[in-house]
Image (spheres, rainbow, N blue to C red):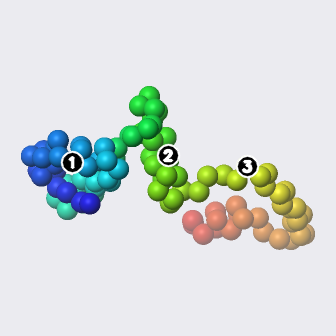
Amino acid sequence: MEIGVRELKAKLSHYLRLAEKGGTIVVTDRGKPSALLIGINGVDSNLSPLAIRVIQGVQEGWIQPASGRRLRKIKREPMKRGARSGLSIIQEGRK
């Protein structure tokens, strides 16, 4: 749901109740998103806003928690003689 700042100010209690019930409200300022209002049901209020957002993402399914498996090592191939390094290619492109 998207609402403007003016409407949020006028009906703050209403939108706080919606967020508390699990709603996500995008607050816009002159049509551009500027804030996100979400409830913190069942979340420790001492957590940082980022941690709360990550927990919400896991609950909503758009963040997938780590599986706990270790990643396999990738074998690095040695550079071939005469090959240019990535750094030199980038530096050349910046000139």
Residue under numbered circle 1 = 15
Q: Reading the chain from its start, which is encountered first: label 3 or label 1?
A: 1
Circle 3: residue type:
Gly
Q: Nearer the viewer, residue 81 or 10?
A: 10
Instruction: Calculate the distance from the C-alpha at mark 2 to the C-alpha at mark 1.
Output: 21 Å
Q: Amino acid at mark 2?
A: Ile
Question: Circle 2 sits on which residue?
Answer: 55
Count of numbered labels shown in the rendering: 3
- Tell me which residue sits at (66%, 52%) in the image: 66
Residue at the spot 24% in from the left edge and 43% down from the top edge: 16
Confirm or deny contact between disc 2 and disc 3 (CB under 8 A). Answer: no
Q: Which mark is residue 68?
A: 3
Quadrant in the picture for the C terminus: bottom right
User: Vertically, is 28 above or below 12?
Assistant: below
Distance between mark 2 and mark 3 Cα atoms:
17 Å
Q: Is residue 35 left or right of residue 66?
A: left
Q: Are marks 3 and 1 in contact (CB under 8 Å)?
A: no
